[in-house]
């Protein structure tokens, strides 16, 4: 259990780096409530678990190849930019992604969450470096590593649930006009994340 709680603490520090998924959770819970956001949170946690497993298997080495890394980064950046634009256009009852309706349902939320969460495979490199550093300074047995990884995934669930709680609380009191303005801001920030991912090459070399 000690390794599990270490994973939670370590994962919480990582989650403090606010990214597009955090914004999407806030946006979704604000618009449709906390309970409807739970499946999205679980999808995000599953993708994190998937990337963590890949990192443990050494797949992160594959993305150290500049050609593959750049290709994945460009694809992920385009996805973020398109979803950011769709979030903005939805405020004006326009959708540029046909299979994501203006009035979201559980299927569109899950699909959107899955695509956005997977849109940054460079995350594997991050987790790979995290595990390399952690295991170098604090060697763990196989069982301890599994507990640590469960802690990391639990941190994702706890943090995103906290964000969803804040979002749903805001949604109860915000006027519709303010809520739409926040959605536009969230869309702009997601687009910025996309352009940053597209332009940021230095730290990945």
Image: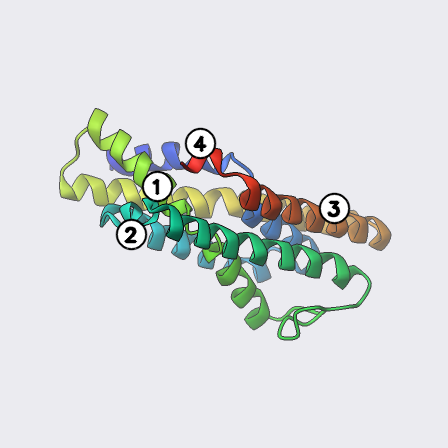
In the rendered image, the vertical position of residue 11 relative to residue 179, given as above or below: above
Q: Secondary structure at mark 4?
A: helix
In the rendered image, the vertical position of residue 135 relative to residue 174, given as above or below: above
Residue matched to label 3? 185
Camera-nearest residue between 79 and 5: 79
Does residue 38 appear anywhere in the picture? yes
Q: Nearer the viewer, mark 3 or mark 4?
A: 3
Q: Quadrant of the N terminus?
A: top left
Does residue 19 appear anywhere in the picture? no
Q: CA distance from mark 1 to mark 3?
A: 29 Å
Q: CA distance from mark 3 to mark 4?
A: 25 Å
Q: Nearer the viewer, mark 1 or mark 4?
A: 1
Marked residue nearer the N-terminal end (3 or 4): 4
Residue pictured at 76% horizontal, 51% vertical = 184
Residue matched to label 4? 13
Q: Secondary structure at mark 1?
A: helix
Question: Among all residues in the image, which is located at the extreme front?
Answer: 67
Whole-percent x and y of residue 62? 29, 50
Residues at marks 2 and 1 touching, judged by CB atoms closer than 8 Å:
yes
Camera-nearest residue between 158 and 54: 54
Marked residue nearer the N-terminal end (4 or 2): 4
Marked residue nearer the N-terminal end (2 or 1): 2
> Is 44 left, or right, of 52 in this rendering?
right
Q: Residues within 10 Å of mark 3 (few under 14, many from 20)?
A: some
Whole-percent x and y of residue 199? 56, 42
Residue matched to label 1? 127
Residue matched to label 2? 54
């Amino acid at each position: 259990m000690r390794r599990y709680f270490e994973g939670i603490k370590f994962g919480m520090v990582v989650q403090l780096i606010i990214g597009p998924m955090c914004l999407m959770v806030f946006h979704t819970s604000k618009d449709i409530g906390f309970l409807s956001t739970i499946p999205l949170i679980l999808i995000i946690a599953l993708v994190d678990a998937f990337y963590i497993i890949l990192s443990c298997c050494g797949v992160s080495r594959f993305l150290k190849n500049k050609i593959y890394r750049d290709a994945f980064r460009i694809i992920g950046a385009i996805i973020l930019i398109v979803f950011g634009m769709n979030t903005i256009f939805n405020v004006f009852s326009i959708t540029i992604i046909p299979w994501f309706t203006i009035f979201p349902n559980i299927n569109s939320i899950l699909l959107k969450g899955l695509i956005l969460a997977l849109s940054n495979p460079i995350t594997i490199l991050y987790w790979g470096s995290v595990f390399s550093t952690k295991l170098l300074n604090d060697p763990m047995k196989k069982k301890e590593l599994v507990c640590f990884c469960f802690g990391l995934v639990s941190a994702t669930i706890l943090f995103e649930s906290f964000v969803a709680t804040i979002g749903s609380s805001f949604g109860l009191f915000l006027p519709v006009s303010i809520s739409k303005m926040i959605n536009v801001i969230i869309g702009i920030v997601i687009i910025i994340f996309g352009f940053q991912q597209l332009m940021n090459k230095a730290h990945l070399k």
